[in-house]
Amino acid sequence: MPKHIVLDTDPGIDDALAILLALASPEIVLDGISAIHGNASTAQVTTNALSILELAKASHVPVYKGCEIPLVQPSLLSPETHGNTGLGYANLSAPLNQARAQHGCDYLIEQIMSHPKEITLVAIGPLTNVALAIRKEPRIVENVKEVFIMGGAIRHQGNTTPLAEYNTYVDPHAAHMVFHSGMPMTLTPLDVTYQCIFLKEDLDRLLKIDSPITKFIADSTRFYMEFHDEYQKIDGCVINDPMTLALTFMPEICDYEDLYVDVDISTGVGLGNTFADFYNYEKKAPNMKVALGVRPRMFMELFLERMEKLANSLS
Ligand code: RIB
Ligand code: CA
């Protein structure tokens, strides 16, 4: 029985790869996408989501535009990481379809409440949409089947400040609301995603297939690899979001700990920092499962095989 996924996303290069992985995986059905500010503006990421779906001949998947700015913080986009369009050097056709009229937050609420305990929410951008959906309809907390979140850095250094990962830094107040909501969450932090580097040789393997899919992956990740080299001296690029998506149907890629995790919303240098109470100083029950161990090649083989299958089907 496939899992029903709703994807809250800020495409974004690695988000785009997560959308493609979702479409290439028979274990899941991508019911819909809510777009959120982050790697690019909400208008831009909404357009990107529509274009990526059309590229993969999946324009039946509805897209909903979500919040445009964080709850409290000023907007922080990441053109240096994902390019001005959010998709690096890729140049997709303008989408023929439009986003649906319903707001992304309302879409999340409607999907979860009309299919109690059936929807797997995958949040791979700043958590503004998810936080506001909880405030507007608190019952989604007990009606969502499960939530997978890409975000945070537990023992790992930040990728946006020395302490904070991008998604939790951009909207730390939203992350705080979601982390303390009681939702059944699994967190995929930088601790595991930074062990899963998409390498040039991985791309070369995909480029053996002549397909619009492999051309898109090459054009988008070339920009992303240049960023990782220039800013973090990494050979390759960290594909955080497809890894988070993969855990919805292949959890054995990672090892997990049940932990109480919090996010710093003070106004100092720690803003957006996520930390786990490993010694249970606070005597609080765990609020999430945290992926802290990973089998990188298990994930990368899955990702490459699924991209090859998708590319061959659209070559
Ligand atoms: O820190 C990495 C995360 O921030 C990824 O989801 C990336 O797409 C950006 O949203
Ligand atoms: Ca993202």
Image: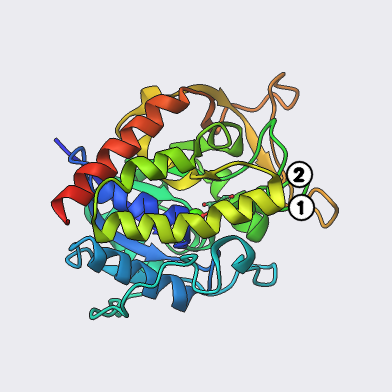
Q: Earlier in the sequence, mark 1 or mark 2?
A: 2
Quadrant occupied by the C terminus:
bottom left
Residue at 50% x, 44% y: name it: 240
- Residue 53 in picture, x, y percent from top left: 26, 64
Image x and y of residue 203, in percent: 40, 45
Question: For this rendering, which residue is in front, 285 or 207?
Answer: 207
- Find residue 271 and name its label: 1
The circle on residue 163 is 2
Q: Residue at x 71, y 44 (%)?
A: 158
* Left or right placement of residue 244 versus residue 302 in this view: right
Front position in the image: 26 or 2? 26
Look at the numbered disc 2 and give the secondary structure of its residue: loop
Return the x and y of residue 217 as percentages of the image width and height: 38, 55
**Foreground: 119 or 9?**
9
Is residue 221 shown to the viewer in this render? yes
What amino acid is found at the position of numbered circle 1 in the picture?
Leu
Does the residue tagged 1 have its C-beta within 8 Å of any atom of ligand 1? no
Q: Residue at x 66, y 55 (%)?
A: 172
Q: Residues within 10 Å of mark 2 (few under 14, many from 20)?
A: many
Looking at the image, which residue sits at the far right?
A: 268
| Cα gap from disc 1 to disc 2, whole angstroms | 8 Å
Which residue is found at the position 65% from the left and 68% from the top? Answer: 76
Is 185 left or right of 116, judged from the image as shown?
Answer: right
- Quadrant assignment, res 249: top left
Residue 87, x across and y down, in percent = 46, 65
Q: Is residue 275 above or below residue 21?
A: above
Q: Amino acid at mark 2?
A: Leu
